């Protein structure tokens, strides 16, 4: 009985565990072809933690490559960071490169979040008090599609970021290109990232 309980408990904590190793995050990104598909150089120096609040239970933490049922991804997610030296500000972006399907991603990337002015607090939480450029949008992979990848990236924020007008709250969210945007506004390479998979509800 005790053993069984311990097993379930450790399985549960494993399932909702956050990323703890930069190497494992890099391996998961590479295995999922993300650096190639996003045209990014992914050499993270920090860990980005993404937690989804739940109405009837504790928040669900993602780790790179986890698949979540869509109904756990309503969000908006909470962000925190580990192994980070700067206090901020930071930019966070989330994109879906698999829309409408991974086989024919003609609408990709879909921008699921873009926000700046995140600062790290003593407990590691990334907090901001300015409106996002693009508010968080829950994954909605269409029926019949395989799971999509939803990729969260953390960047150092350049001093000119709040003046950029390349992407505004009224810009279309489809046909976004995070690496092009990063070049255009001077974000450099992402310093941390993680991703989840979400399939259409069955
Ligand atoms: C989410 O969906 C699954 C399967 O569709 C269901 O079993 C589960 O109860 C749902 N959870 C919530 C929190 O709605
Ligand atoms: C996105 O931008 C990068 C950098 O400019 C470019 O290399 C890549 O081809 C672009 N991707 C698409 C799908 O246009």
Image (tube, rainbow, N blue to C red):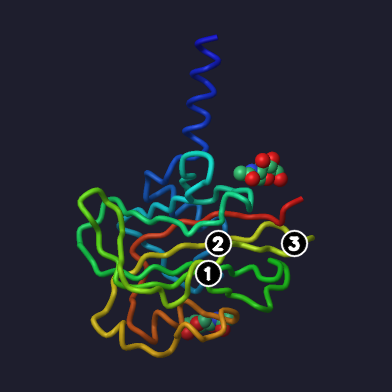
Residue 67 drawn above or below residue 136:
above
Single out the residue that lies furthest toward the right. Answer: 144
Identify the residue at horizontal 39%, vertical 68% (top origin): 92
Residue 145 marker: 3
Identify residue for label 2.
Answer: 150
Q: How crowded is mark 2: few (under 14 residues within 10 Å), some or many (20 or more)?
A: many
List the residue tagged with mark 1: 112
Q: Characterize the local packing of mark 1: few (<14), some (14-19) or many (20 or more) Cα atoms within 10 angstroms.
A: many
Q: In which quarter of the image is residue 190?
A: bottom left
In the picture provided, is 163 more to the left or to the right than 94?
left
Residue 175 against residue 165 in the figure, above or below:
above
Question: Looking at the image, do the residues carrying marks 2 and 1 touch, with CB atoms under 8 Å apart?
Answer: yes
Q: Where is residue 151 in the image (x, y as percent from the top left)?
A: 51, 62
Crowding around mark 3 (Cα neighbors within 10 Å: few <14, some 14 to 19, many 20+) is: some
User: In terms of sequence position, does the residue under pointer 1 or pointer 3 come before the other?
Assistant: 1
Q: Where is residue 134 in the image (x, y as percent from the top left)?
A: 47, 75
Q: Nearer the viewer, residue 31 or 74?
A: 74
Which residue is at the far front? 55
Q: Of helix, strand and loop, which one carries label 1?
A: strand
Q: Is mark 3 on a helix, strand or loop?
A: loop
In the depicted structure, whether residue 21 falls above or below residue 91 = above
Residue at the location (56% across, 79% down)?
A: 173
């Amino acid at each position: 009985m005790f053993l069984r309980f311990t097993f379930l408990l450790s399985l549960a904590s494993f399932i909702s565990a956050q990323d703890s190793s930069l190497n494992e995050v890099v391996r998961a990104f590479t295995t999922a072809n993300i650096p190639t598909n996003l045209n990014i150089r992914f050499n993270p120096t920090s860990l980005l933690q993404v937690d989804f609040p739940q109405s009837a239970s504790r928040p669900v933490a993602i780790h790179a490559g986890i698949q979540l049922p869509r109904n756990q991804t309503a969000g908006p997610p909470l962000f925190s960071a580990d192994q980070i030296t700067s206090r901020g500000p930071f930019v966070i972006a989330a994109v879906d490169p698999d829309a409408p399907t991974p086989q024919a991603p003609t609408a990709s990337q879909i921008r699921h979040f873009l926000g700046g002015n995140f600062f790290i607090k003593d407990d590691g939480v990334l907090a901001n008090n300015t409106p996002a450029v693009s508010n968080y949008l829950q994954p909605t992979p269409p029926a019949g599609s395989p799971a999509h990848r939803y990729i969260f990236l953390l960047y150092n924020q350049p001093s000119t970021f709040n003046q950029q007008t390349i992407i505004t709250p009224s810009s279309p969210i489809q046909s976004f290109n995070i690496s092009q945007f990063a070049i255009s506004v001077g974000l450099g390479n992402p310093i941390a990232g993680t991703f989840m998979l979400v399939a259409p509800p069955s």
